[in-house]
Image (cartoon, grey):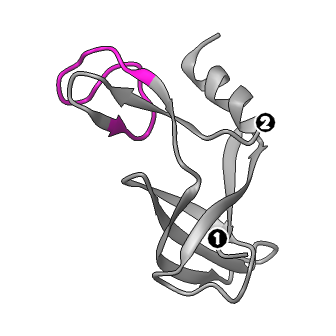
Amino acid sequence: MNLKETIFEKFKDGIFLNTFCPHCKKQIWPPSNNCKDCFNKTVLKEIENKGILLEMSYSHIPKQENFFGIGDFSGIRILGTIVEKNIKVNDSITIYNIKIIDNKISIEFGNYNK
């Protein structure tokens, strides 16, 4: 199984994996088999699903109207849909749901304090 297939399989179980360089001690995002700095082989590491909402906006695209935002999770900035409308910038958030739609990752953020 390749890297993408492995990560997608874990997403189905609600586990968010990313690649990590044991040599540089850095998260590698987007996931890659090799570190972008030292070119050493990376390993898979689970990302904590608790983070902070850094930015948010509203999409006016027809049939895709919704709030979305950028969350910081373990130092990785991830774009996701905000499923709870009472969330504001700098609030604690959690990865509420991970879906694979048309072979693309769709992430939903929820309120961590709920």
Q: From this viewpoint, which residue is outermost toward the front?
A: 113
Q: Secondary structure at mark 1?
A: loop
Q: At 72% from the left edge and 79% from the top edge, which residue is drawn?
A: 66
95 is higher (above) or lower (below) than 69: above
26 is higher (above) or lower (below) than 72: above
- Give the CA separation, mark 2 to mark 1: 21 Å
Q: At 67% from the left edge and 39% from the top edge, which residue is drawn?
A: 15
28 is higher (above) or lower (below) than 58: above
Question: Would residue 89 be found to the left or right of residue 42 on screen?
Answer: right
Question: Would residue 88 be found to the left or right of residue 14 on screen?
Answer: left
Q: From this viewpoint, which residue is outermost toward the left?
A: 38
Q: Main secondary structure of the magenta part?
A: loop
Q: From this viewpoint, which residue is outermost toward the top?
A: 1
Horizontal and vertical percent for residue 16?
A: 61, 41
Quadrant that contains the C terminus: bottom right
Q: At 52% from the left edge and 43% from the top edge, which residue is drawn?
A: 47
Residue closest to the eye, 68 or 15: 15
Q: Residues within 10 Å of mark 1 (few under 14, many from 20)?
A: some
Q: Which residue is mark 1?
A: 112
- Looking at the rendering, the stretch of residues picked out in magenta corresponds to 27-43
Q: Which residue is mark 2?
A: 12
Residue closest to the eye, 111 or 5: 111
